[in-house]
C-alpha cells in the first residue's frame, strides 16, 4: 500500500518549526488520500527527537541514523534518503522548504527520476499542489503524473504547526550505508555575519524600503518618514545586496525577523522571503504603485501610488499630527 | 579555470502579468526581458574568478531566439563565448527536463566550475544547479555568496537562514548555485558591447541534444493570488491619502 513520508529537519538538536508545519501538511494530505503517514528523522543522534515525534499521529517514526549524518552534507543526506525511499516506497515524500532541503531534495528527486514540487503553499483536490510564480504575483497549480514517488516541499508558514495531530507511533531504526569517501563537501561551523548594531527585532516602529526607491540617492525620502515616526529604517534584500543599506537592516528569511506595532513597506513587492520576516507585525502599511503587488495581500492599509509623492505627504501629515 | 555560467532570460521585473488564453502562462507579447537576477551574480562571480586566476567564461542559456539579447549582454559584460540552446518549449519541460538539456550541452565542455543562479524570478523552482550536479555526478553547494580558489579546490561562503553563514570546502570540478548580493554587479561598457558582437555564440538545437521532454510534474493552471486579509485601500491625492492614513493609525489602529 502507498504511504506518505515526511522528512523532519533538526536545527540545534531540536525539530525545526517548519518541520512541524510539513508534518501538519503530511497529515492533511494523508487524511485527504486515506494514506498512512510516517516521519523520518535523519541524523547521527535521533533518539530523543524520534521519541518526541512518536507522540504524534503517525504510522511510524524512522530514525535514519549514521555517524556521517551528524553534520548536514548534500551527499550524505541524498544517499541516506535515497536508500530509505527505495526501501519504504512511499507514494509521497514531503519536506519543509528550508535552505537545507533546497540544497539536496532536487538531487534526491532527480536520482529517482522525479522532480520536486518545491515551496508549496497549499494542497487541493487531485491532489494538486499550489506554489507561487513570478515572485508571488501569480499562483500555479501543479500535478504529478506517472509512477512516484511525488516529492513536495512546503513553504514556511503555509501550514500550521499547531494543527499537528497527537497520537502514538512505533519507532524504527534505519541504518543507511554511507562511506566517508562518498561525501565530497566539507562543511564548516555556522557563523554570524557582521556585528549587529541595530536591533530591528525589538523596534516598535519600522519604515522599510524596497527596490521601488530606485537608488541610494533617494533614501532621504524614507529616512525623513522614519525620523518623523521615530522609526528604525529597514530594507528588503535588493537594497542590502546593492549596498545601499547595511545587511543588518535586511528583513526577511535571510535577514531579521521583526514584530513592530507598525511596519511601513515602501516600494516593496512582498515576496514570501520578505513576508516571513514581518508576520509578527501588528499593523502593516504598504505603499506601492502596483495595485496587484503581493504586499497588499498582507497589508492592513494600502496606498496605491508613486512613493515619491505619497511618502513625503505622509511625513508631513505625521509631523503635523505629532505637534 | 574554465567556468560555465548558466543564465536564464526572464520577464523584466515590472513586466505586467496578464494570464493568457490558455490559462497556463502569461501573455508575453508586451513584455520586456532581462537576465535573471541571481544569474547576473553568478556571472559576476565567474568574471571575477577569471580576472584573478585567468581562464575562460562560457555562458549557457536555453530559450527561444529572444534569449539572444540576454546572451549578448553577458558577453558584453565580459564572458568569452556562449552556447545558446534554441528551445521554444521550455515551458513544457519540468526542472529535470531543462537540467537534462543543459547537462547534455555542458558534458562535452568539461568545465572546472559550473555556476547557476539560485532561482529564477519567473518560475522560481530553484533547482537547476542542484539537479545539474546530480546529472553530471559533481559535488555542489547552493546559496553561495563568495568563491575562493584554493590549492585543493574551492572554499565557498554559503548563506544560512536568519543572518548565519558557513564556509564549505569542495573539490573541483563542482557546481555552485549563487545567491544574490555577494558582490557588486558590473555594467557592460561601450567597448564591451562592441566586442560582444564578434564573440562566438554557438547555437545547439534542443533536438540534437536528445534530452527527453517527458515530464512527471505539470503546471495545470495559473491564477492571480487571492487576498488573505482585508486591506483597506486609501485613495485620493497624495495629501488626502496621507491624511487618511494618519487618521486611521491614530484612531482606528491606535498606534500613533
Ligand atoms: C533564498 C532567498 C532568500 C531571500 N531572502 C530575502 C530576505 O531575507 N529579505 C528580502 O526582502 N528578500 C529576500 N529574498 C528576495 C526576495 O525573493 C525578493 O526578490 C525581494 O524581497 C524583492 O525586494 P523588493 O520588494 O524590494 O523588490 P521588487 O520585487 O523589485 O519590488 C519593488 C516594488 O516597488 C514598486 N515600485 C517601483 N517603483 C515605485 C514607486 N515609484 N512608487 C511605489 N512603488 C514602486 C514595484 O511596484 C514593486 O512592487 C530572498 C530570496 C531568496 C531566493
Image (cartoon, coloured by chain):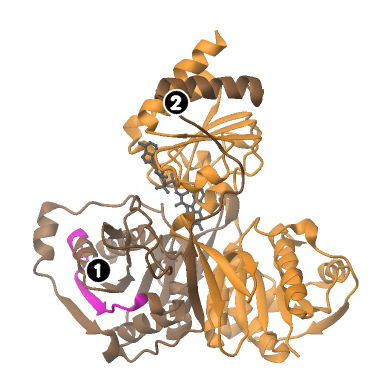
Residue in view at x 57 percent, y 49 percent: B227
| Left or right side of B167 for B184 | left
Q: Is B252 rendered above or below residue A103?
A: above
Residue B159 belongs to magenta span: no
Quarter of the image that includes the C terminus of chain A: top right
Q: Which mark is residue B229?
A: none
Residue A40 appears in the rendering: no
As rendered, which of A119 and B112 lies closer to the eye?
Answer: A119
Question: Does residue B219 lie above or below B78 as drawn?
Answer: below
Q: Is mark 2 within 8 Å of ligand 1?
A: no
Residue at figure coordinates x 67%, y 86% from the top left? A85
Q: Nearer the viewer, residue A300 or A113?
A: A300
- Part of the protein shown in magenta: B75-90
Q: In the rendering, at what x and y percent does residue B15 appear?
A: 33, 53
Among the chains pictured, the one given orange colouring is A
Any mark on residue A223, and which?
2
- For chain B, the rendered hue is brown
State the SS at label 1: helix
Q: Residue at x 80, y 63 (%)?
A: A164
Q: Position of residue A290 (x, y in %)?
A: 41, 43
Spatial separation of the CA atoms under disc 2 and disc 1:
39 Å
User: Could you say which is closer to the camera, residue A251 or residue A74?
Assistant: A251
- Quadrant holding the N terminus of chain A: bottom right
The reply, left or right, for residue B59 in relation to residue A281 is: left
Helix, strand or loop at label 2? It is helix
Rendered image: mark on residue B67:
1
> At which x and y percent is residue A72?
63, 70
Amino acid at each position: 500500500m502507498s504511504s506518505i513520508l515526511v522528512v523532519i529537519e533538526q536545527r540545534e538538536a531540536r525539530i525545526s518549526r517548519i518541520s512541524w508545519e510539513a508534518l501538519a501538511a503530511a497529515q492533511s494530505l494523508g487524511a485527504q488520500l486515506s494514506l498512512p503517514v510516517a516521519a523520518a528523522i535523519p541524523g547521527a543522534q535521533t533518539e530523543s527527537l524520534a521519541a518526541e515525534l512518536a507522540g504524534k499521529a503517525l504510522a511510524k517514526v524512522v530514525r535514519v541514523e549514521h555517524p556521517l549524518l551528524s553534520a548536514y552534507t548534500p551527499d550524505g543526506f541524498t544517499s541516506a534518503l535515497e536508500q530509505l525511499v527505495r526501501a519504504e516506497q512511499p507514494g509521497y515524500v514531503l519536506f519543509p522548504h528550508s535552505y537545507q532541503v533546497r540544497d539536496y531534495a532536487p538531487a534526491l528527486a532527480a536520482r529517482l527520476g522525479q522532480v520536486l514540487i518545491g515551496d508549496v503553499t497549499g494542497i487541493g483536490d487531485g491532489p494538486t499542489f499550489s506554489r507561487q510564480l513570478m515572485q508571488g504575483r501569480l499562483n500555479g497549480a501543479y500535478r504529478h503524473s506517472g509512477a512516484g514517488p511525488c516529492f513536495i516541499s512546503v513553504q514556511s508558514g503555509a501550514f500550521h504547526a499547531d494543527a499537528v495531530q497527537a497520537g502514538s507511533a512505533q519507532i524504527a531504526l534505519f541504518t543507511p550505508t554511507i562511506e566517508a569517501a562518498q561525501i565530497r563537501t566539507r562543511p564548516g561551523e555556522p557563523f554570524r555575519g557582521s556585528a549587529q548594531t541595530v536591533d530591528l527585532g525589538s523596534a516598535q516602529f519600522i519604515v522599510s524600503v524596497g527596490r521601488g526607491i530606485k537608488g541610494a540617492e533617494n533614501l532621504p525620502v524614507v529616512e525623513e518618514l522614519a525620523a518623523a515616526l521615530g522609526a528604525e529604517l529597514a530594507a528588503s534584500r535588493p537594497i542590502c545586496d546593492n549596498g545601499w543599506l547595511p545587511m543588518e537592516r535586511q528583513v526577511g528569511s535571510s535577514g531579521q525577523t521583526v514584530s513592530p506595532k507598525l511596519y511601513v513597506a515602501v516600494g516593496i513587492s512582498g515576496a514570501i522571503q520578505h513576508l516571513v520576516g514581518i508576520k509578527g507585525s501588528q499593523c502593516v502599511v504598504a505603499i506601492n504603485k502596483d495595485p496587484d503587488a503581493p504586499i497588499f495581500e498582507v497589508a492592513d492599509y494600502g496606498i496605491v501610488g508613486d512613493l515619491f509623492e505619497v511618502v513625503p505627504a505622509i511625513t508631513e501629515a505625521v509631523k503635523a499630527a505629532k505637534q | 579555470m574554465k567556468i560555465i555560467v548558466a543564465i536564464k532570460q526572464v520577464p523584466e521585473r515590472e513586466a505586467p502579468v496578464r494570464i493568457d488564453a490558455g490559462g497556463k502562462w502569461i501573455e508575453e507579447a508586451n513584455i520586456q526581458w532581462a537576465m535573471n537576477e541571481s544569474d547576473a551574480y553568478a556571472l559576476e562571480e565567474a568574471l571575477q574568478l577569471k580576472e584573478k586566476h585567468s581562464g575562460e567564461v562560457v555562458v549557457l542559456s536555453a530559450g527561444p531566439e529572444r534569449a539572444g539579447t540576454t546572451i549578448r549582454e553577458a558577453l558584453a559584460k565580459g564572458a568569452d563565448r556562449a552556447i545558446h540552446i534554441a528551445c521554444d518549449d521550455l515551458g513544457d519541460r519540468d526542472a529535470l527536463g531543462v537540467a537534462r538539456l543543459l547537462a547534455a550541452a555542458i558534458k562535452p565542455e568539461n568545465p572546472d566550475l559550473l555556476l547557476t543562479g539560485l532561482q529564477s524570478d519567473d518560475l522560481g523552482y530553484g533547482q537547476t544547479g542542484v539537479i545539474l550536479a546530480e546529472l553530471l555526478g559533481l559535488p555542489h553547494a547552493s546559496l553561495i555568496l563568495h568563491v575562493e580558489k584554493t590549492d585543493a579546490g574551492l572554499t565557498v561562503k554559503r548563506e544560512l537562514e536568519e543572518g548565519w553563514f558557513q564556509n564549505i570546502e569542495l573539490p573541483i570540478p563542482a557546481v555552485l548555485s549563487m545567491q544574490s548580493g555577494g558582490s557588486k554587479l558590473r555594467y557592460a561598457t561601450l567597448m564591451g558591447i562592441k566586442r560582444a558582437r564578434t564573440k562566438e555564440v554557438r547555437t545547439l538545437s534542443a533536438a540534437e541534444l536528445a534530452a527527453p521532454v517527458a515530464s512527471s510534474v505539470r503546471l495545470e493552471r495559473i491564477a492571480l493570488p487571492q487576498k488573505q486579509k482585508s486591506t483597506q485601500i486609501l485613495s485620493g491625492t497624495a495629501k488626502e491619502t496621507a491624511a487618511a492614513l494618519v487618521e486611521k493609525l491614530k484612531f482606528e489602529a491606535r498606534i500613533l
